[in-house]
Image (tube, rainbow, N blue to C red):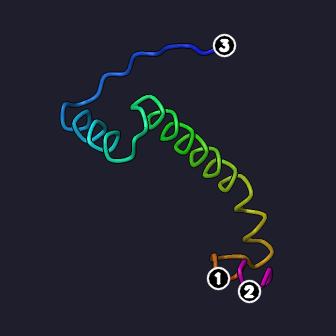
Amino acid sequence: MKNTITVRIEPHLEKLLERVSRQTGRTRSDLVRDALRRQLALLRFDSLRRKVLPFAEARGYLTDEDVARDIS
């Protein structure tokens, strides 16, 4: 079952959405759903990262390079 929501966007964003929709052959709804999924995933990742940051820092993981060094 799908639900419908209404979102107000600025005219320039609507024009950009329409242009990208035409260029990619994807519907505006599909583009908006994809953008929402990605944004929500980024927000969740950021939230989880903030929760584990103290534990990582305590073990010497201060940068992305520190992590890459140990998993490569």
Q: Sequence order check: which comes first, mark 3 or mark 1?
A: 3
Tell whether label 2 touches label 1 (CB within 8 Å).
yes
User: Mark 1 belongs to which amino acid?
Assistant: Glu
Q: Label 2, secondary structure: give it.
A: helix
Quadrant showing the N terminus: top right
Say which residue label 1 marks: 65
User: Mark 3 belongs to which amino acid?
Assistant: Met
Q: Residue furthest left?
A: 11
Magenta segment includes 53: no
- The region drawn magenta spans 67-72
Mark 2 burial class by Cα count in 10 Å: few <14, some 14-19, many 20+: few
* Residue sitting nearer the eye, 59 or 9: 9
Q: Residue at x 80, y 75 (%)?
A: 59
Residue 67, image x, y percentages: 72, 77
Q: Residue at x 79, y 83 (%)?
A: 70
Tell whether label 2 touches label 3 (CB within 8 Å).
no
* Residue sitting nearer the eye, 68 or 30: 30
Residue 31, image x, y percentages: 44, 38
Whole-Å distance between the Cαs marked 1 and 2?
A: 6 Å
Whole-Å distance between the Cαs marked 3 and 2?
A: 45 Å
Quadrant showing the C terminus: bottom right
